[in-house]
Image: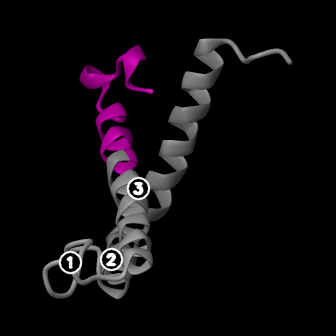
Amino acid sequence: MILPAPKDSIERARAARRRLLAVLGTPEGQQVLTELETRFETELPVFQGKCGSYDPLDAMRRDAHREVFLVIRHQLALAARETTPTNHTEHDA
């Protein structure tokens, strides 16, 4: 198996972030993202219920939902930073 050159990987990652920014970086995209975060309750703590009594599968599900949105928000922030010429660096991929 031939691995892609690091520069190719960086460019592919940047292209993916630019596509994400084009879709979710708009006011409508931000509204959709916010509505989804509300729907999946990403602002709530992972562990719900009384101390020592919680559903571990529910906690796992909530944590997974939260992680997806953290990744999306991080990638959007990187894409926005990369579109500013003064902040464009090779190590951001």
- Image check: 21 left or right of 84? right
Q: Residue furthest right?
A: 1
Q: Is residue 78 above or below residue 72?
A: above
Q: Is residue 11 above or below residue 90?
A: below
Q: Residues within 10 Å of mark 3 (few under 14, many from 20)?
A: some
Q: Is residue 71 above or below residue 1?
A: below
Query: Quick check: marks 1 and 3 in contact, CB under 8 Å?
Result: no
Provide residue 17's location: percent of width, then percent of height: 48, 44
**Location of residue 11 by image quarter:** top right
Q: Nearer the viewer, residue 76 or 22?
A: 76
First to last magenta residue range: 75-93
Position of the N terminus by quadrant:
top right
- Label 3 residue SS: helix
Name the residue beneath numbered marker 2: 37
- Residue 60: say if magenta: no
Name the residue beneath numbered marker 1: 44
The residues tagged by marks 1 and 3 sit, at their Cα atoms, a distance apart of 18 Å
Instruction: Inspect the image, locate mark 1, and give the three-letter code of the amino acid beneath it.
Output: Leu
Name the residue beneath numbered marker 3: 72
The residues tagged by marks 2 and 3 sit, at their Cα atoms, a distance apart of 11 Å
The residues tagged by marks 1 and 2 sit, at their Cα atoms, a distance apart of 10 Å
